Image (cartoon, rainbow, N blue to C red):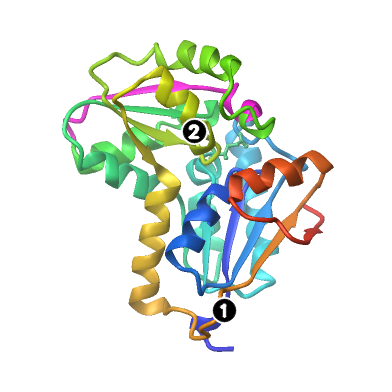
Amino acid sequence: MSRANRPIGVFDSGIGGLTVVHTLRRLLPGESIIYLGDTARLPYGTKSHRTIERYTLQMGQILQRFEPKLIVVACNTASAHGLLALQAASSCPVVGVIEPGAEAAALVKGPVGVIGTLATVSSASYDEALRRRDPDKVIFSVACPLLVPLAEEGWFDDPITDAISRRYLNQLPFEAKTIVLGCTHYPTLLPSLERTRPGTRWIDSGEVTAQSVDRLLQGSLGYRTESARGPLRILLTDASSRLREVGERFLGEELGNVELVEP
Ligand code: DGL
């Protein structure tokens, strides 16, 4: 099979990366996508660098079996801790969500807030990526560990999510009018987040990553040449019945057949 017709491999610690797949399928409907969610070992956000790096490499190995033309690490936590190792170990290009998110945030004037998992925020990866582009950028970061379980529970638009979001977002000074959603689960919580902090410009790291994938395909990787809508295969390391229902809300379409793989 020619390289352009090979699938794009997308990986996340769970089903959060399906928000990135949703955008990829909107922007690049002809592409074939293999999604891999490490649902058996979620969350990554509370784990150490070593463990997240090891899990990321294992997930990359599983995706390599499908000979992808590109791997998208659709998880901020894995991008912060495992991207470099995976890039070194992979035979295809690998992109994460932090560089595109930082790129978009650096273009905006004024201080920037970053919300993410504990592991993402403590890695300071966004700070580093933003300061590389703008050394004077004022950045405020807050770890929001309870938001991932709320999203996985499907409490997207709920008074309890409002209260927890308020508690986290109130830690960011009001001059931070732009906030990076530094976790691929968070776009699903936007109804609550917007209510909590109206007038904020939200940067969805997954959305801007999908745009950068489009640019890569436009370049040397190439678009899939078949005209039909591209197939989507979903592989998970564990699948509960609840997951299907919530996963469809993340993806915005039916999940179809879910295949189980060993991590
Ligand atoms: N979706 C992951 C991210 O973007 C977070 C979920 C987790 O903690 O595993 O950071």
Q: Secondary structure at mark 1?
A: loop
- Front position in the image: 92 or 54: 92
Mark 2 lies within 8 Å of ligand 1 (Cβ measured): yes
Q: Residue at x 27, y 22 (%)?
A: 176
Q: Are marks 1 and 2 in contact (CB under 8 Å)?
A: no
Position of residue 26 relative to residue 252, above or below, is: below
Q: Is 191 situated left or right of 233 in this image?
A: left
- Front position in the image: 256 or 233: 256
Q: Is 163 situated left or right of 213 in this image?
A: right
Ligand 1 occupies quarter: top right
Query: The magenta stretch spans which residues?
Result: 135-150
State which quarter of the image contains the N terminus: bottom right
Asked if the stretch drawn in magenta spans residue 142, the answer is yes
Residue 65 pos. (x, y %): 69, 71
Position of residue 259 relative to residue 47, above or below, is: below
- Furthest toward the bottom, the residue is 1
Position of residue 186 relative to residue 258, above or below, is: above
Residue type, numbered disc 1: Arg
Residue 261 pos. (x, y %): 80, 58
Q: Which residue is mark 1?
A: 6
Q: Which residue is mark 2?
A: 120
Crowding at mark 1 (Cα within 10 Å: few <14, some 14-19, many 20+): many
Q: Residue at x 70, y 37 (%)?
A: 42
Q: Residue at x 58, y 50 (%)?
A: 252
Asked if the stretch drawn in magenta spans residue 233, the answer is no
- Front position in the image: 130 or 216: 216
